Amino acid sequence: MEQATLVQNKSEYSVATVGNMADFGGKVFLKELINTTGMEVSIGSIEAGQSVPFFHSHKQNEEVYIFLSGEGRFILDNDEIAVESGTIVRVAPSVMRRLCNTGSTPLQHICIQAKAGSLEGYTMTDCGNYAPV
């Protein structure tokens, strides 16, 4: 499945699915589907031996990649880092980036991007929940 399906949509929340992650391939962006207003979220899967076919950077958005399965290398400007299930990488907007799958199974990840420097402060409340400062 290379698409996401909207399951429920209310003004307060949206629910979508891409099905079983073990069967997911390709890349899907969720902003339009779940109506995010301050971030873009995508789910990607790169097949064994494949890579993103281009380097890219952003003008304003930083990204956080959360790797779910597989193994690969992440080229960040002139650096190369190994990634695998459980690796989390933050990338500043200006950094040139490209993902490569070096393993024998799909390299699956979630990518969250938002405008750098836009997060408001948070503090803990007495009941253990985060609350805006």
Image (cartoon, rainbow, N blue to C red):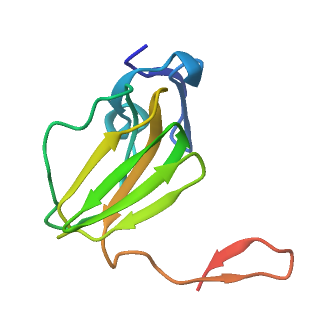
Q: Where residue 73 sits: x, y (%)?
A: 36, 50
Vertically, is 128 above or below 47?
below
Q: Is residue 108 above or below residue 23?
A: below
On the image, the x and y values in percent for residue 38 come to: 36, 58
Residue at the spot 69% in from the left edge and 73% down from the top edge = 130
Q: In this rendering, would 5 be left or right of 33?
A: right
Q: Residue at x 40, y 66 (%)?
A: 90
Instruction: Note whether 13 is above or below 88 in the view shown.
Output: above
| Residue occupying the point 51% across, 40% down | 11
Res. 64 visible in picture: no
Tell which of 28 and 45 is nearer to you: 45
Is 113 left or right of 23, judged from the image as shown?
Answer: left
In the image: residue 43, left or right of residue 117? right
Residue 3 screen position, x and y as percent? 38, 19
Q: Position of residue 28 (x, y in %)?
A: 35, 30
Q: Nearer the viewer, residue 69 or 124?
A: 69
Nearest the eye: 125 or 53: 53
Whether residue 74 can be seen here = yes
Quadrant for the N terminus, please: top left
Q: Is residue 126 left or right of residue 99?
A: right
The quarter of the picture where the C terminus appears is bottom right
The residue positioned farthest toward the right in the image shown: 127
Along the line of sight, the residue nearer the viewer: 101 or 122? 101
Residue 93 lies, with reference to residue 35, above or below; the image says below
Count of numbered marks: 0
